[in-house]
Image (cartoon, rainbow, N blue to C red):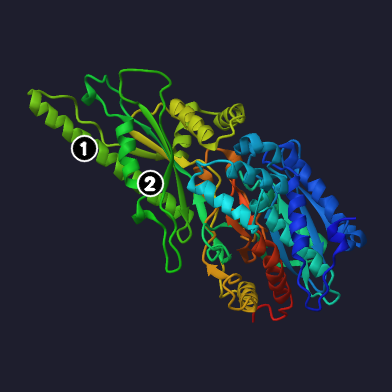
Amino acid sequence: MTNVQQKSVSRTGTRIDSKLARELALRLTSWRSETGTSGEAKFADQLQGLLSELPYFREHPEDLRLVDSHGDPLTRNVVALVRGTGKRTLVMAGHFDTVSTDNYHELKPLACDCLKLKDALIENLSGRDDRSEQEERALQDLLSGDFLPGRGLLDMKSGLAVAIACLEDFAADPDRQGNLMLVTTPDEERESRGMRSFRDALPSLAAAFDIEVAAGINLDVTSDQGDGSEGRVVYAGTIGKLLPFALVIGCSSHASYPFEGVSAQAMATGILARLEGNAALADRDENDISPPPICLEAKDLRDGYEVTTPERFWIAFNWLYHAMTADELFDRFRQEVLSGATEAVDRFASRSAEYGRLVGRSAGSTPARPRLLTFHELRALAGQVSGEGFDALYAQQEKALSHIDNPLVLTRQLTEWLVGIARLSGPTIVIGLSGLHYPSSRLRLNELNDRALHQAIEKARAGLGNDPERSLVWKPHFQGISDMSFLGLAASGNQVVSDNTPISRLIDRPPENAQRFPTVNVGPWGREFHQKFERVHEPYAFGVLPDLVSEIARTFLADNSQGK
């Protein structure tokens, strides 16, 4: 018999037992589920087994289901529905995969055993006199008794534990209104394949359950290096993300005669100067400002040493947004890339002329103005050169490279392969997108369910009172990439994104009947997720959050007016 089964919460005002949520979190964390491992694939069965012990699911096993996601061994989503009255349903969501435990080094065997890990970290850190500021902070947090470490405990099995506690709390209420659903997904840490597979299955799943999903709460985490006031947050939406790239093709020359060509690296430097951390390119509106674009990778594509200037150079960027559309972002990238490369070529031509005056002769011919092609245009050109059967040839090449896990590397190799087929010469730049597109989202208070969810949260916030240890603030957008981009967004397949993403598996193709409903993020807070000292703040995660989420759900589901 599980602790979940033993403890039911009455609806007479009793708080959800914080020990219950904590024990659940410890148990979930002990099940290793690193992304891409057999543990990730096994987790769904383990969680289904835990949930099936709850009284509600012993009586209603048909309301506990597994939904296939991806991979070999197959990973699956766990869907658990507790029915009340009517069709109105709220979804609580979270992912169960975690990043690697390798950065625990000698403590790796303890990475998912939270209590033993805590003792080991305290012993390890206490025995050293050369602690860094980060290590000192971690030690004091662990000694305080308010923080608990463990791989995936913060990101985000503590959030899953909260959701399970809320689900049991809901099931224990004989007067419950509406329906409460829990969905837990794999693969958030890489490509959100779990949430995307759930999104695709939801229309038929909702029909089979005979429910109407009206809203969602994601329970992902927030990092706060302070007192928690920046971590106790409800996010009204999530930030969007694209990974634009530029493959720069120059005209190489001998280093002794540099002005007989134009370096791809010089053009790439011009592009980088236009984009890297440029605050003017930060997306903004009256509510929020997203971080500016930042370079993730920049490299000369030669394998060996040559006394020639680089002919090909690759740069890739991370660009977050919330107010722009993906089309607008890609068009802005095109403008900045072409301007940066053109400025670099013009500058190089000017220096060639200056050097020619010094030596009294021409140092080289004036380089041509660079041209820019989108990946879509490059692929069309390569198809014209290659002729009939090109699409099959492309699919064959992509399959041959499918063992490459890094999307930047795979994108670059596919693009270079097409450049060779199309026989492109420089100066030319090819631009495209090298990763999965994460759309942005936001509450739309002119819509009924969005407004009802907002009102339910406001009521729950008011119930927290003025206690500075419990206060909750609104923020416009969750700043990390998360499954929120695919939970509750209507079909948003973007043609520009699809046309310019070389890797077909990273082109998101939502079904036309994908369901739209408002989703917010309300989750635990802690410090240093994905790092060795990943730790969750226990008093909030287990003492405040379960009641808060439960109150939001009950208020929203009881709103028969649906926000009118």
User: The N terminus appears in which quarter of the rendering?
Assistant: bottom right
Using the rendered image of the protein, determine whether residue 326 is visible from the camera's viewpoint: yes
Quadrant in the rendering for residue 11:
bottom right
Which disc is residue 509 wearing?
Answer: none
Quadrant in the rendering for residue 355:
top left
Residue at x 78%, y 78% (from the top left corner): 13
Asked if residue 265 lies left or right of residue 409, the reply is left
| Residue 492 picture location, percent across and down | 58, 56
User: Disc 1 on helix, strand or loop?
Assistant: helix
Residue type (three-letter) at the residue carrying disc 1: Arg
| Residue 206 picture location, percent across and down | 77, 61
Q: Which residue is mark 2?
A: 334
Q: Is residue 27 above or below residue 322?
A: above
Using the rendered image of the protein, determine whether residue 493 is visible from the camera's viewpoint: no
Asked if residue 286 lies left or right of residue 7, the reply is left
Q: Residues within 10 Å of mark 2 (few under 14, many from 20)?
A: many
| Nearer mark to the viewer, of 2 and 1 | 1
Residue at x 54%, y 29% (from the top left corner): 388
User: The C terminus appears in which quarter of the rendering?
Assistant: bottom right
CA distance separating discs 2 and 1: 20 Å
Q: Which residue is mark 1?
A: 347
Q: Is residue 553 above or below residue 153?
A: below
Residue at x 34%, y 56% (from the top left corner): 280
Asked if residue 390 lies left or right of residue 514, the reply is left
Label 2 close to label 1 by CB (< 8 Å): no
Q: Indicate which disc, 2 or 1, sits on the residue closer to the N terminus.
A: 2
| Residue 288 picture location, percent across and down | 45, 64
Between residue 370 and residue 559, name the one nearer to us.
Answer: 559
| Residue 234 picture location, percent across and down | 58, 66
Residue type (three-letter) at the residue carrying disc 2: Arg
